[in-house]
Image (spheres, helix red, strand yellow):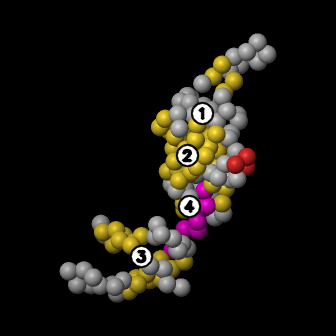
Amino acid sequence: MTWRNHYSPGPIAWPIHVTASSPPTGPELGGTVIALSGFGFEDGPLLACRFGTIFPIAAAFIGTERVECASPAHAAYAVPVGVGGNGRDYSPGGGLFGSPAMLDYQMSVRITAVVPRTGVTGGRTPVFITGVGFVNSTLLSCRLGREVGRCRLNR
């Protein structure tokens, strides 16, 4: 919601507050759709996200309490995520003023080996994947063809 007063020549946006972001991690290549929850979001041509020092990033207005943005490419470390509605000011993220909105960019996964190369048609063959950049998480999954399943990280 915007309004004008006699002291300001242009519109003033109500403060935007981001209270949460999900998912907490994404690849350094970008492209992860981040859902930002909070209040004060208003649809408009200047609605945008900020990832660390990278802005403006196009935002999709889902509702007054939710905005979504696709993360840009970024080096592998955590950055605060914020939302702005006037093209200039962004809500703080990353613990600033109580906002936990962060995206922890992860190193891209590089697979160096898959063993065995073949298995039985009925499935249930253990598959071992070797590489770098795997993150030990409850969200860890593996895709073989069209099948997606849970994985376990062994170090």
Image location of residue 47, percent across then percent down: 58, 34
Q: Secondary structure at mark 2?
A: strand
Crowding at dot 4, Cα within 10 Å, few <14 / some 14-19 / many 20+, comes out as some
Label whose residue precedes the other's in the sequence (4 or 1): 4
- For the residues labelled 1 and 3, the Cα–Cα distance comes to 39 Å
Three-letter code, disc 4 = Thr
Q: Which residue is mark 4?
A: 25
Residue 91 is one of the magenta-drawn residues: no
Provide the major secondary structure of the magenta segment. Answer: strand
Q: Helix, strand or loop at disc 1?
A: loop
Mark 2 lies on residue: 36
Check disc 3 and report its element: helix, strand or loop. loop
Give the image quarter of residue 13. Answer: top right
Mark 4 and mark 3 in contact (Cβ < 8 Å)? no
Q: Earlier in the sequence, mark 4 or mark 2?
A: 4
Query: What label sits on residue 62 in the rendered view?
Result: none
Q: Residue at x 49, y 84 (%)?
A: 154
Horizontal side of 20 relative to 123 (left or right) equals right
> Residue drawn 66% across and 19% down?
3
How many residues crowd around disc 1 within 10 Å: few (fewer than 14), some, or many (20 or more)?
some
Q: Which residues are magenta?
A: 103-110
Residue 26: x and y in percent read 54, 60
Q: Which callout, 3 or 4, points at the residue further toward the start of the chain?
A: 4
Of badges 4 and 1, nearer the viewer stands 1
Q: Which residue is mark 3?
A: 151
The answer to whether 114 is drawn above or below residue 40 in the figure is below
In whole angstroms, how far apart are the C-alphas of marks 4 and 2? 13 Å
Please identify the residue farthest to the top as the structure is shown.
Answer: 6
Tell me, yes or no, whether the two marked residues, 2 and 3, touch with CB atoms within 8 Å. no
